[in-house]
Image: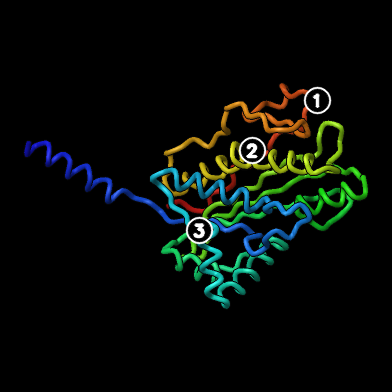
Amino acid sequence: MRFILIIFCVFISAKAYALTYNVVVLPADILRVCENYYCYPEVSEIISNDLISYFNSSDKIKSPSLQEIRRILAQNPSLKSAVKSSMDKFSSRGNVDFQSMKQLARMFSANSVLLISNSVATENSSRNRSVWEILELSSALNISYPYTMETDAVLLDTVNDLVMWRGGYSKILNSSDGSFIAQKASQSYAKYAYLQAYSKDILSKTIGQNVVLRFFPKSVTPVLNTKEIKPSGNYFRYESSNPSAGKLDDKLEEPLEHDYGEMIYGI
């Protein structure tokens, strides 16, 4: 009996001292709530929520919810203003304000912040827009351009003011006929459901695995999920696996172009 008790105590002690890291996941659009015509969350927020769920489902990384982050910012107007200014600079120019990120991280006893931004680039415009803004314009004007959605993830060490890792990901938004419009509510919801599936089943897992690798080298393999996913609606199609270019059907839209990023320094 005493032997069993000793083993139990050792097990509890090991669990209590298991190494975990606190990481604040911060979408660039965290202070932009339902400003689009369709009143859907911005894609950066969708991805961030999936990343938070991914991290909190493990015993390696813990992240506060976006509701908690918004509550803290609402209680601290000066910090909220600093974060908004920082996110505007990050979205427009890719600049990182380490001072405001450091302040935010301290509020959650964290030493790391994961920034997530998302935008759509077009060949005929140098300005990046949100997915919903592009969808509204395309639907209203009935125009069609090659729309590429760009997602950037940057992991910051707020103690040493360093970029630990960054990765860039792109995805063609146009459907097989080259259009990207939603003239009915059901069409806009189908696109929203697709983006949700794309984030949950591919993008958040790819980013999440790479982040975990920065804290726990060799603990995971950064590969895409091979589970077959079929989002609702026939407006988009994609492969959840990491297909080789030679096997792609010309009629399918391009798969996720992923970049596992560069590790600036090791931990």
Q: Residues within 10 Å of mark 1 (few under 14, many from 20)?
A: few
- The quarter in which the N terminus is drawn is top left
Mark 3 vs mark 2, CA separation in Å: 23 Å
Q: Are marks 2 and 1 in contact (CB under 8 Å)?
A: no
Q: Is residue 192 above or below residue 230?
A: below
Q: Are marks 3 and 2 in contact (CB under 8 Å)?
A: no
* Most foreground residue, 69 or 184: 184
Q: Position of residue 145 (x, y in %)?
A: 88, 44
Q: Residues within 10 Å of mark 3 (few under 14, many from 20)?
A: many
Q: Residue at x 57, y 40 (%)?
A: 206
- The residue wearing badge 1 is 250
- The residue wearing badge 3 is 24
Q: Residue at x 62, y 42 (%)?
A: 199
* Colour scheme in use: rainbow
Q: Is residue 163 visible?
A: no
Mark 2 vs mark 1, CA separation in Å: 22 Å
Foreground tag (3 vs 2): 2
- The residue wearing badge 2 is 197
* Most foreground residue, 209 or 136: 136
Foreground tag (1 vs 3): 3
Q: Position of residue 17 (x, y in %)?
A: 27, 51
SS assignment at label 1: loop
Q: Is residue 84 above or below residue 150?
A: below
Inspect the image, locate mark 3, and give the three-letter code of the amino acid beneath it: Val
Inspect the image, locate mark 2, and give the three-letter code of the amino acid beneath it: Ala
SS assignment at label 2: helix
Inspect the image, locate mark 1, and give the three-letter code of the amino acid beneath it: Asp
SS assignment at label 3: strand
Q: Position of residue 105 (x, y in %)?
A: 48, 65
Say whether disc 3 or disc 2 marks the residue closer to the N-terminus.
3
